[in-house]
Amino acid sequence: MKRVVTASLMKKLDANAIENHHVPSLVLMERAALAVVNAIPEEKRKQVLVVCGTGNNGGDGIAVARILKMKGYKVQIYQPDSSHRKSPDCALQEEIARSYGVTWVNNPQWSEYTTIVDALFGVGLSREIEGIYAETAELVNRTEAFVIAVDVPSGIDSDTGQVLGTAVRADKTVTFAFAKAGQLLRPGCEYCGELEICDIGIYEETPMEKPDTFYLEREDLKQVPQRSEGGNKGSFGKILLIAGSEGMAGAAYLSAHAAMRCGCGMVKILTPAANRDILQKKIPEAMLSVYATKQEAEEALMAGLKWADTVAMGPGLGQSETASMLLDLVLEHGTHPMVLDADALNLLSTRRDFLLQTKGPVILTPHLGEMARLCGCRIDDIQPRVLYTARSFAWKYRVQCVLKDSRTCVALPDGTAFINRTGNCGMATAGSGDVLCGVIAGLLALKTPYTIAGALGVWLHGKLGDQCSEKTGPGYMMAGDLIEELKYFRIGDTKGDCYEKI
């Protein structure tokens, strides 16, 4: 698990290293510049242009140019507007570079360069770039050179990932100490290209700014409890899956299959009687509890709630009166961890306050359309503020919100959030969300801590998609392919390296 910081927190951590730990600012600048130089591929160093601003990010860039010059490479510096007052460190770096004979140019021949280093603006940018700076960004984007950004591509809001008017589109971004949220969220992550996080001597301090934001790595999968050699199907978790409607048995199947592939002991599918035959044939390992009337549905649900230790609801459920009744009963009587997905969320949009009365921990897994209905707003209102929206909803309704997007954000009731970095466009296919519902429910059934289960489920789901994409290409993936990849993760296995394929 790695921390993600805001621009304001990064500024405080930088100041803390300088003022409290007495690390000279120029030492940090030199280490940052060395990290950028080392990240430029050797074959791309033939002719380098460093595009610099007048702040400390520009100072980093000037140091990059000087180091490249001293290593024998052809390098030039272009400052679009040197009339602005320079920061003290930028001015000193310029003095040093000029003493070593580094060349400044006023009219660069853009087509000549094999690498362009973007050091115009750093993480503190909060206004739209315009004028000569916007023109420069556009010129950089038109070249065929390898583009490497210092800390963050100029024009990207480092907190939200939004484009501030225009932005440099980098092939690689070298950032320092910690990832910034805007480098992980879209569209910022697309402008960053490959993101490399480098240690320059700025370290995490306690206490840190709240609320916390993180991204997960493969080591975090070890937070799933190991399977006991003396366990049985009951001790590995019992899931009540309330899913499916007439003609929508597939969603119930995908969720149940994913949950069982995660390693849970038993899944009982509560579904209309019309789905009995197909589910018995597709997944005989699952138990079925079927109903034909509202009364039968209520009786089956109450019995299922007593039996289960985890509840998942929504895939293919529909929005009938019976489905609405089942949701009300789950919210009123459910005491175990529950995952609400798909139609359960659509039904919930008319009764959001019911969430404040639930007795057990709840995880919601809306996509942007479902989130818009839950919030009573438009998708366009949410898309630029995915992290903020997930955090606000989770805090207000005391739930865990898994807001699904191309970069899914997971927020806990206390404000802690996770930005997911796994997954690909091939997962934008029917049934993928049903699989995620089953994966999260499966992890909960295995007693994975509630505080990590949603984010870990999203990470794992995306990793399954990445492995599928490597095999088939993103355009040929199906939701069922994700489930087949689960067997290779050996979740909770006690023998050998369970994570060697991840």
Image (tube, rainbow, N blue to C red):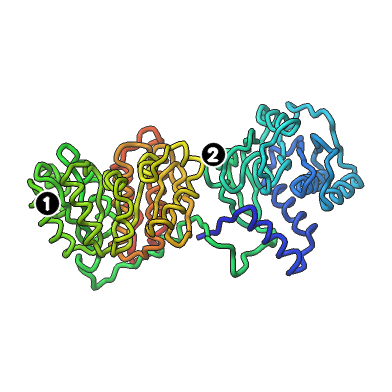
Question: In the rendered image, which residue does mark 2 sit on?
Answer: 187
Q: Is residue 261 left or right of residue 247?
A: right
**Residue 189 locus on image (x, y percent):** 55, 42
**Residue 180 locus on image (x, y percent):** 59, 51
Neighbourhood count class around disc 1 (C-alpha, 10 Å): few under 14, some 14–19, many 20 upward:
many
Q: Is residue 109 left or right of residue 321?
A: right
**Residue 302 locus on image (x, y percent):** 14, 60
Kindly identify the amino acid type of the residue bearing the numbered disc 2.
Pro
Residue drawn 54% across the image and 39% down it = 187
Quarter of the image where one finds residue 144: top right
Quarter of the image where one finds residue 26: bottom right
**Residue 110 locus on image (x, y percent):** 74, 28
Callout 1: helix, strand or loop?
A: helix
Question: In the rendered image, which residue does mark 1 sit on?
Answer: 297
Kindly identify the amino acid type of the residue bearing the numbered disc 1.
Ala
Furthest residue to the right? Answer: 99
